[in-house]
Image (tube, rainbow, N blue to C red):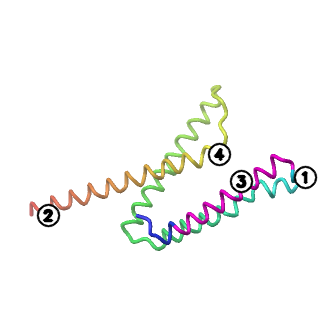
Amino acid sequence: MPGKRYLIEFVVALLAYALLMTLSLVALNNGWVQGGMRTVVAIAPMVACVGIWGAVVRHLKRSGPEEGRVQLIAIGFAFAGTALITVTYGFLEVAGFPRLSMFLVWPLMVVLLVLGQFLARWLQGTADGLEGEENDEA
């Protein structure tokens, strides 16, 4: 379970992202910025994403070995699943399916990460239960 410190760091960075994204979209959609500044304003929310990234990395660094193993399994599950789904859909696009925005990749990764965490915790609980049964028989 994530620690309180991690949740605070993560939520503050996420709120900063939401604020920067809102300001960026309002400025771009209302024509408040022109030329090369449009690019700068468009990627401004990514500054807060560095904070999100930092919070996640610090959390993983502070985690114990059991939590680290859960996160490793979840990240591997999300990485491989995202690769499988995006490449498959890429081939479907060649076959005539509609093009999808790259904005869909990150939510896909998050969903698979959460599923991977549940899977890893379930596997860890199953392994702990099996080890307990083996010890009971001895």
Please tell me which of labels 2 and 1 falls first in the chain: 1
Residue type (three-letter) at the residue carrying disc 2: Asn
Tell me the residue that label 4 is attached to: 103
Labelled disc at residue 13: none
Instruction: State the residue at coordinates (75%, 50%).
Output: 25
Element at label 2: helix
- How many neighbours does mark 2 have within 10 angstroms: few (below 14), some (14-19), or many (20 or more)? few
Between 14 and 130, the one nearer to me in the picture = 14
Would you say the residues marked 3 and 2 are in contact, meaning their CB atoms lie under 8 Å apart?
Answer: no
The amino acid pointed to by label 3 is Thr
Give the CA distance from mark 1 to mark 4: 23 Å
Q: Quadrant of the C terminus?
A: bottom left
Give neighbour class at mark 1: few <14, some 14-19, many 20+ (Cα, 10 Å): few
Callout 1 amino acid: Gly
The quarter of the picture where residue 41 lies is bottom right
Q: Which of marks 4 and 2 is in front?
A: 4
User: Which mark sits nearer the N-terminus, 4 or 2?
Assistant: 4
Q: How far apart are marks 3 and 2 (CA)?
A: 56 Å
Task: Please give left or right for residue 24 compared with residue 10 in the image.
Answer: right
Q: Position of residue 107 (x, y in %)?
A: 57, 47
Mark before the other along the chain sequence, 3 or 1: 3
- Please give the range of residues in magenta: 8-31
List the residue tagged with mark 2.
135
Gap in angstroms between the C-alphas marked 3 and 1 = 20 Å
Q: Which residue is drawn at 60% across and 33% down?
A: 91
Mark drawn on residue 22 = 3
Near mark 4 (Cα within 10 A), the count class, few <14, some 14-19 or many ≥20, is few
Identify the image quadrant of residue 98.
top right
Q: Earlier in the sequence, mark 3 or mark 2?
A: 3
